[in-house]
Image (cartoon, helix red, strand yellow):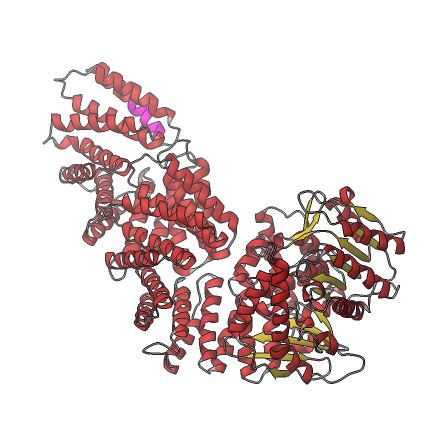
């Protein structure tokens, strides 16, 4: 007996070392000594239950550290023997408690309800045999509270959850501040409070959860094996507070905590899948907030890793499958790739199949699967998907109690399904049902909750659909209520808040409440730059901005309805070309600031250099640079002389851009269309366009895109049939009323077309009926993305000398040959022998970027790519790859004068990104070129060469390209004369610049 006791004491020494945080290898030593102690203890020895308990405890703690399930099974067997040997002995409290805990842990990893029942039974027995209010009782209280939590999650009642919190609160209160188990009890209490917040929606539980979880992490050493789980618990709580209140700091904190947890977790640990999926959820949240695709890709990788590491029948399998399915569904929404959506549905169906009917997480799986089926119906139009979505949503709603944190979102999802059913079937009752569901959703979430913006947006859209058809169309009172909802939105992703303003403002305009419309729409426009993450890729940012196509058009229309063209122009300037404006801001001349506030000017110049460098700095460094940038702007604007420094310019500051002509903004909203004539010396003038309708614009834009992108044998016939009709329609509805409103001049008046929305796809400069005078006979046309872009080009000095660069590729790897490009290049080179000629294999990205800073005139005869889904991925196709739009726009060329882009679709924009005007022509203007010649759609190789030769022959041989617009106008007229029945050959050439 003496030897057994001494061996057990050695085991306890090693066990205590582990508990002090000295490493899991101490557990191996403890188990070894306890095994020896047990071996020296006979079956009749009164100390045998103690030895069994000690060894069982070592195995259980080693499972907690290393995750080997065999340790857990051995612990249960040993502890069970200990309890069975003396079932009524109060000295077996430790064995009972640890046996209950071991069963609870095995339930977590195997999902067998019998283990959970055994856990509750043994822990209740342990509590009744415990005397006093000391640490032992605290441990049992904590463990029993955890068992009640699991019972609640597997179909128990709210009383189980309340009992869990009461028990765990008592456990923490009985645990001294310096007790080694205080941290784990705090962490467990935090998790339980978080569960009650999800179930009942009480935000006080959420704040208390973060407090408890934070104290648990603070009390845990860096080497403690439980640190990853406690970090993850705190990360989950911060993520859920972000979902509630929308503070980005909570979400960033959540990701940082989860990443730290993952970095210190032992390989193969059983908690690895849970930690990976929690981190993935946080990345999904950040993707939905900021639209950065890398966040979503990271979430998919983490979800797949979690699923691969999970045992087949693990209790968490359904939740991990569901989270991974949601990530793939979001990938579909970004890429519109149906295989991604089908895969998401497969994952979510499996999640539902593996979720017990009474599991706490099942309603969420029902709702997420409903979302996926609704997406597939919207894309493919199969009625079974819509029917399945409604069934799933209704099941989700009926499965959760009033007050559940997720219930309002489920009501909103169900409303969306009824809206789709109305659009499919025309059943007006579906719209009224959707309105009722959305009003209940809004009423169920407090002011300041992040989801409120989504519900308001959906209600505004639904009310708009029902304006003329619903059994109970909205009245002015309902509109005022919606407007108050919008103005009170203080939380939520900026993109959701902008959508809310857009839908409600559009509704207000449609109802004739134009004052309300402009108030709501202007606020949405002011928030628009915040919908993107400034450090994100161009493709991420332009995609997020593309979600708000139509916002500018509605705001302009509402201002025009109030007879305020000045505000209409300023609204368009605020909401269009957001990325272009940001680039222009980064290049604003600082001369006046240098003179008045030299220290701040130097600091701003330094931080601009950091943010604009070609190779971006690490994310954290750029975040600090942006924070410093914003601080400097705030400090500069405190000076009365610079109160509007880098704020959106007013029309009075921009009207000089229209010197020697007229800038014509053309806009078409849902209910009205107008042109606004902006001149340098007069107030802007509104020209109503009553025959231009929203539906016609969309229909003709689809026809135009189909015609210009057709590649089959009928492409030429399609263009010849469609384009004359489009040009005639443009003349009748848009250009001819505008020409009548322009003051007559001799020579022809200069016009800069500034179309909003998808009107930017159309060749307004070529409008007219075949064989009759049209736009080419009435005005000399140019285009500008925004007034600010034109003003910027005007303020740049003309080139002092003419230094050319010619880039021509007759052969581009992987693309059709362009034989006319070499003749085109040779002709240009013969006119300027000093101009570098980069042809074919010499025309590399590096050579072009190296030679452009020395050139004032640049000519490109090559292929170009235009990615309509992600315009910034387009560019010039050179010998060794694509010189992309972002690479071009980052250039800052001091004396750049003229860029002639004799390539395909160099000024083309897709429908989704029409208001951003991201294309090669705008990129070259950002790089510094005052004048750019480009094409709206692909142009035949021989015609492109003919047009270029004619342009350069007619253009004066001066350093400045001041006559570029009039010269291109004459070239286009000549091409029209030669090919009157083929507007596809002469209508695409356009000029941008002063």
Magenta stretch holds residue 701: no
- When asked about the image quadrant of residue 33, the answer is top left
Position in image of residue 365 (x %, y %): 32, 51
Position in image of residue 613 (x %, y %): 68, 50
Q: Is residue 599 visible?
A: no
118 relative to 556, above or below: above
Residue nearest the viewer, comparing 730 with 667: 730
Question: Overall secondary structure of the magenta stretch?
Answer: helix
744 relative to 153, above or below: below
Magenta stretch holds residue 12: yes
Is 624 displayed left or right of 304 in the figure? right
Q: What residue appears at the point 66 percent right and 82 percent down from the top-left corner?
A: 684
Position in image of residue 184 (x %, y %): 32, 41
Position in image of residue 979 (x %, y %): 73, 66
Q: What residue appears at the point 30 percent right and 72 percent down from the top-left corner?
A: 429
- When asked about the image quadrant of residue 901, the answer is bottom right
Quarter of the picture containing the N terminus is top left
Residue nearest the viewer, comparing 745 with 413: 745
Is 152 displayed left or right of 744 in the figure? left
13 relative to 152, above or below: above
Quarter of the picture containing the C terminus is bottom right
Per the rendered image, the range of residues in magenta is 11-18
Q: How many marks?
A: 0
Q: What residue appears at the point 77 percent right and 44 percent down from the top-left corner?
A: 840
Is 848 displayed left or right of 233 in the figure? right
Q: Is residue 718 visible?
A: yes
- Outermost residue toward the left in this view: 88
Is 773 displayed left or right of 198 in the figure? right
Residue nearest the viewer, comparing 896 with 974: 974
């Amino acid at each position: 007996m003496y030897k057994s006791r001494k061996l057990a004491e050695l085991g306890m020494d090693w066990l205590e070392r582990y508990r002090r945080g000295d490493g899991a290898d101490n557990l191996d030593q403890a188990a070894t000594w306890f095994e020896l102690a047990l071996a020296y203890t006979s079956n009749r020895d009164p100390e045998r239950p103690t030895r069994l308990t000690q060894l069982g405890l070592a195995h259980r703690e080693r499972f907690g550290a290393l995750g080997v399930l065999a340790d857990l099974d051995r612990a249960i067997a040993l502890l069970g023997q200990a309890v069975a040997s003396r079932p009524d002995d109060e000295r077996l409290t430790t064995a009972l408690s640890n046996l209950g805990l071991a069963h609870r842990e095995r339930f977590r990893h195997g999902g067998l309800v019998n283990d959970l029942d055994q856990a509750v039974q043994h822990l209740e027995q342990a509590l009744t045999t415990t005397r006093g209010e000391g640490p032992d009782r605290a441990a049992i209280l904590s463990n029993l509270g955890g068992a009640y939590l699991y019972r609640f999650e597997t179909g128990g009642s709210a009383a189980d959850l309340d009992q869990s919190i009461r028990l765990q609160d008592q456990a923490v209160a009985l645990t001294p501040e310096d007790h080694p188990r205080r941290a784990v009890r705090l962490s467990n209490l935090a998790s339980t409070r978080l569960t009650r917040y999800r179930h009942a929606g009480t935000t006080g539980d959420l704040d208390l959860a973060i407090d408890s979880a934070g104290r648990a992490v603070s009390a845990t050493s860096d080497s403690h094996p439980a640190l990853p789980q406690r970090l993850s618990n705190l990360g989950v709580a911060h993520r859920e507070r972000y979902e509630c209140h929308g503070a980005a700091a909570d979400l960033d904190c959540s990701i940082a905590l989860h990443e730290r947890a993952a970095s210190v977790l032992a390989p193969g640990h059983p908690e690895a899948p849970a930690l990976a999926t929690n981190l993935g959820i946080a990345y999904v949240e950040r993707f939905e907030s900021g639209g950065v695709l890398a966040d979503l890709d990271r979430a998919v990788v983490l979800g797949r890793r979690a699923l691969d590491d999970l045992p087949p029948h693990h209790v968490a399998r359904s939740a991990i499958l569901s989270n991974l399915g949601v990530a793939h569904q979001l990938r579909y929404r970004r890429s519109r790739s149906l295989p991604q959506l089908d895969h998401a549905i497969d994952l979510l169906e499996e999640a539902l199949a593996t979720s017990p009917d009474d599991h706490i997480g099942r309603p969420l799986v029902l709702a997420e699967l409903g979302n996926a089926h609704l997406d597939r119906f919207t894309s493919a139009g199969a009625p079974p998907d819509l029917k399945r979505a409604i069934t799933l949503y209704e099941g989700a709603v009926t499965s959760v109690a009033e007050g559940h944190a997720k219930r309002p979102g489920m009501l909103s999802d169900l409303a969306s399904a009824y809206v789709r059913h109305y659009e499919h079937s025309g059943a007006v009752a579906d719209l009224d049902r959707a309105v009722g569901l959305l009003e209940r959703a809004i009423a169920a979430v407090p002011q300041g909750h992040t989801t409120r913006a989504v519900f308001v947006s959906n209600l505004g859209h639904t009310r708009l659909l029902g304006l003329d058809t619903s059994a109970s169309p909205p009245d002015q009172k309902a509109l005022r209520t919606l407007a108050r909802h919008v103005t009170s939105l203080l939380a939520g992703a900026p993109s959701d808040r902008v959508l809310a303003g857009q839908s409600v403002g559009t509704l207000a305009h449609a109802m004739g409440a134009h004052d309300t419309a402009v108030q709501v729409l202007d606020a949405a426009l002011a928030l628009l730059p915040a919908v993107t993450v400034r450090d994100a890729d161009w493709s991420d940012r332009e995609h997020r901005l593309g979600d708000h196509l139509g916002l500018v058009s509605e705001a302009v229309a509402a201002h025009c309805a109030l007879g305020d063209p000045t505000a209409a122009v300023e609204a368009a300037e605020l909401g269009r070309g957001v990325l272009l404006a940001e680039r222009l801001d980064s290049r604003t001349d600082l001369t006046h600031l240098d003179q008045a506030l030299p220290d701040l000017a130097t600091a701003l110049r330094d931080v601009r250099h950091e943010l604009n460098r070609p190779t971006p700095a690490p994310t954290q460094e750029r975040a600090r640079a942006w924070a410093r940038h914003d601080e400097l702007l705030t400090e500069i604007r405190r000076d009365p002389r610079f109160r509007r420094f880098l704020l959106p310019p007013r029309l009075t500051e921009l009207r000089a851009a229209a010197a020697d002509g007229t800038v014509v903004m053309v806009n078409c909203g849902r209910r009205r269309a107008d042109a606004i004539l902006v001149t340098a010396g007069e107030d802007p003038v509104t020209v109503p366009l009553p025959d231009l309708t929203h539906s016609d614009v969309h229909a003709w834009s689809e026809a135009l895109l189909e015609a210009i992108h057709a590649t089959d044998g009928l492409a030429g016939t399609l263009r010849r049939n469609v384009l004359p009709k489009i040009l005639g329609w443009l003349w009748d509805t848009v250009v001819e009323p505008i020409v009548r409103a322009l003051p007559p001049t001799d020579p022809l008046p200069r016009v800069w077309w500034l179309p909003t929305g998808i009107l930017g796809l159309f060749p307004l400069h070529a409008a007219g009926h075949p064989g009759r005078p049209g736009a080419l006979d009435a005005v000399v046309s140019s285009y500008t993305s925004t007034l600010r872009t034109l003003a910027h080009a005007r303020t740049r000095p003309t080139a002092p000398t003419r230094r050319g660069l010619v880039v021509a590729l007759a052969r581009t790897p992987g693309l059709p040959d362009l034989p006319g490009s070499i003749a085109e290049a040779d002709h240009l080179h013969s006119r300027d022998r000093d101009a570098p000629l980069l042809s074919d294999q010499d025309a590399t990205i590096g050579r072009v970027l190296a030679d452009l800073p020395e050139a004032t005139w640049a000519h490109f005869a090559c292929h170009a790519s235009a990615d309509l889904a992600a315009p910034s991925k387009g560019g010039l196709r050179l010998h060794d790859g694509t010189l992309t739009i972002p690479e071009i726009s980052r250039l800052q060329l001091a004396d750049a004068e003229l860029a002639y882009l004799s390539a395909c679709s160099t000024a083309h924009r897709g429908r989704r990104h029409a208001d951003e005007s991201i294309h090669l022509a705008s990129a070259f203007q950002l790089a510094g070129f005052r004048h750019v010649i480009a094409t709206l759609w692909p142009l035949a190789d021989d015609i492109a060469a003919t047009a270029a030769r004619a342009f350069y022959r007619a253009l004066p041989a001066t350093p400045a390209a001041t006559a570029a617009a009039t010269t291109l106008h004459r070239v286009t007229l000549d091409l029209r004369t030669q090919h009157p029945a083929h507007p596809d050959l002469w209508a695409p050439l356009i000029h941008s610049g002063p």
